[in-house]
Image (cartoon, rainbow, N blue to C red):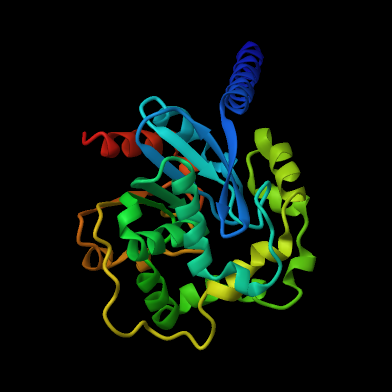
Amino acid sequence: MGSEVARSALILACAAGAFGAMDDLDKRVTHGYADSNGVKIHYAALGEGPLVVLIHGFPDFWFSWRHQMEALAKSRRVVAMDLRGYNLSDKPKGIDNYDMRLLVGDVAAVIRANGGGKAVVVGHDWGGAIAWQTAMHMPDLVDRLVIVNLPHPRGLMRELARNPRQQANSQYARDFQKPDAHRKLSAEKLADMAPAEVRDRYVEAFRRSDFEAMLQYYKRNYPREPYTEPEGEPVRVKVPVLQFHGMRDWALLPGALDGTWQWVDGGYALVTIPNAGHWAHWDAAEEVTRKLAAWLDGR
């Protein structure tokens, strides 16, 4: 019984520490907006030094990177953005406003708003897809590239064309591509993916978001049936790439990672995390943060 009391006290102390750290992060970040051809893109910034831009996925917002921001901001300016359609960023109407070209332009706008030059670009899920494309099509803006749980687009397209299990596990994306799919979403339902201690923060952010806009990413950019393998020569990634993948990710299976090295010219490092799922930067926050910081520092 005594050990249970001690255990409960420890859990409460850890939870209080986590809340305190998150409250402290909220107080210390500065908020800003980048102008992306008339669309305002919100970001939260911390620290000074070389620029790191963090891009979240679905469903999420800038706070996704809370674990990594603290560590990276010790020697860098760390900027976590809200994708268009989410939280405090603008939410333009219409599927064409979510074309990948414009999403890459949003990253460019955030880099310009924070001094310009080159940035380390880090992305998870849809943020990872945008990060890959930014490195491919705006290489002058990218110093290094970090991807969390989003295979190279050619690898994903290959698996969708060849792998029945990936096809089956992508049913959620086909459902999201249906015309009225956003009507089935709610802030509370989406926030169920977040840890209990930050769930209320996610409910608040999703209530400020536009569910139809969230799903435009899938309708405009995710491959549609019949799935086919990519043709022609790929646009090569010229910068060094560090890729993390939680192996328990049911939506993006690890087979899509095979052969990624052949599309990257700047050096490629892959870290697979057996016990992490789709949000590897949460599930293995300490490992991801430590290895990311070491890679950026050349250790």
Viewed as shown, does residue 90 lie left or right of 74? right
- Name the one closer to the observer, 118 or 1: 118
The image shows residue 177, relative to residue 76, as above or below, that is below
- Name the one closer to the observer, 82 or 169: 82
Of all residues, the one furthest to the top in this rendering is: 2
- Name the one closer to the observer, 95 or 206: 95
Q: Position of residue 155 (x, y in %)?
A: 36, 71
Image quarter (top left, top right, bottom left or bottom right) of the C terminus:
top left
Viewed as shown, does residue 170 lie left or right of 121? right
**Residue located 38% across and 36% down the image:** 287
Image quarter (top left, top right, bottom left or bottom right) of the N terminus:
top right
Q: Position of residue 46 (x, y in %)?
A: 49, 30
User: Residue 175 occupies which quadrant of the picture?
Assistant: bottom right
User: Residue 254 occupies which quadrant of the picture?
Assistant: bottom left
**Residue located 39% across and 49% down the image:** 121
The image shows residue 229, relative to residue 250, as above or below, that is below
Evaluate whether residue 250 shows in this view: no
Viewed as shown, does residue 91 lie left or right of 64? right
Of all residues, the one furthest to the bottom in this rendering is: 226
**Residue located 62% across and 57% down the image:** 39
**Residue located 52% across and 65% down the image:** 102
User: Residue 256 occupies which quadrant of the picture?
Assistant: bottom left
**Numbered disc total:** 0
Evaluate whether residue 217 shows in this view: yes
Q: Position of residue 38 (x, y in %)?
A: 62, 58
Q: Position of residue 96 (x, y in %)?
A: 61, 74
